[in-house]
Image (tube, rainbow, N blue to C red):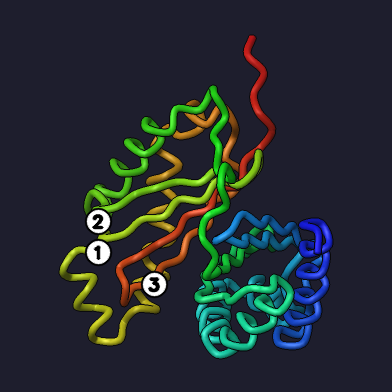
Amino acid sequence: MSGKSTEANITGFLSTFLRTHFGKGPTSIRVTIQKPYVVMHLKGFMAPMEAILCRQGEEKRILETRDLLMQEIGPLLMEGLGEQLGDTVTDLFADWNLDERTGIIIGLTGAAPEENGFSWPDEVDKEELHKRVAQANAKSQKVPGFLDSFWLNDRTVLIKRADILVEIEKELVRQGYDEVLRLVKRPLERKLFKEAGLEPILRRDIEEVYMDWEFDLDVGYIVFILGPARTET
């Protein structure tokens, strides 16, 4: 099966799956496959009841509900994505931008990284990007023990971080407050990344930032959705 056919099949499957479990599917889905990563960018995704809650200022309630629902339906979603990919999906991460009615779902497969699948544009200084991300991370937690990034395509950059939690965060997770931690960390880290000066390095505007974590493993992922490459003047 060709890559384009697989992407189209995932789009169809995910649209139906989300409509079934959320009551409404997205208006569009952009699928990027660079194994072991499968990144699905959703647009126009908000159920009618969620829109009412947004107008009432209840965004936190929506995010909590979506996170809980994703935990519940995660195994079914991983199984379905695995069938479309012809591979095993081992983990899922998700984040939402309610203001823009967009979201991201990241699937991790058991496949080895594709050879030459993550080449970086010549004009982007990957080491400097890592330095700035680590500095931003240190302001909210600590310098990551592990940091790597992957240029999935001209609009999508994925960053993996590990060994990022400080002791108080680990204790919150042990005490069962991982959802509270997730809701607090997202807006704080988005603010820090906005201030980190990443766009001049990437030579592109950052249109959206998504992030999610596997707190038990002390691992997190960030996805930058980028604008077009800047033309030098």
Q: Which amino acid does label 2 sit on?
A: Gln
What is the CA distance from the residue labelled 2 to the residue labelled 1? 6 Å
- What residue is at 57 percent from the left and 68 percent from the top? 107
Mark 2 crowd level (few <14, some 14–19, many ≥20, 10 Å Cα): some
Quarter-wise, where is residue 4 in the image? Answer: bottom right
- State the residue in front, 228 or 44: 228
- What residue is at 32 percent from the left and 36 percent from the top? 131
State the quadrant of the C terminus.
Answer: top right
**Of callouts 2 and 1, the N-terminal one:** 2
Q: Is residue 218 above or below residue 47?
A: above
Q: Is mark 2 on a helix, strand or loop?
A: loop
What is the CA distance from the residue labelled 3 to the residue labelled 2? 15 Å
Where residue 9 appears, x then y in whole percent?
81, 70
Quarter-wise, where is residue 178 in the image? Answer: bottom left
State the quadrant of the N terminus.
Answer: bottom right
- State the residue in front, 222 or 68: 222
Q: Mark 3 points at which residue?
A: 214
What is the CA distance from the residue labelled 3 to the residue labelled 1? 11 Å
Q: Nearer the viewer, mark 3 or mark 2?
A: 3
For the residues bearing labels 2 and 1, Cβ distance under 8 angstroms: yes
Q: In this view, does 67 lie above or below 184?
A: below
- What residue is at 51 percent from the left and 46 percent from the top? 150
Left or right: residue 41 versus residue 48 is left
> Which disc number belongs to residue 165?
1
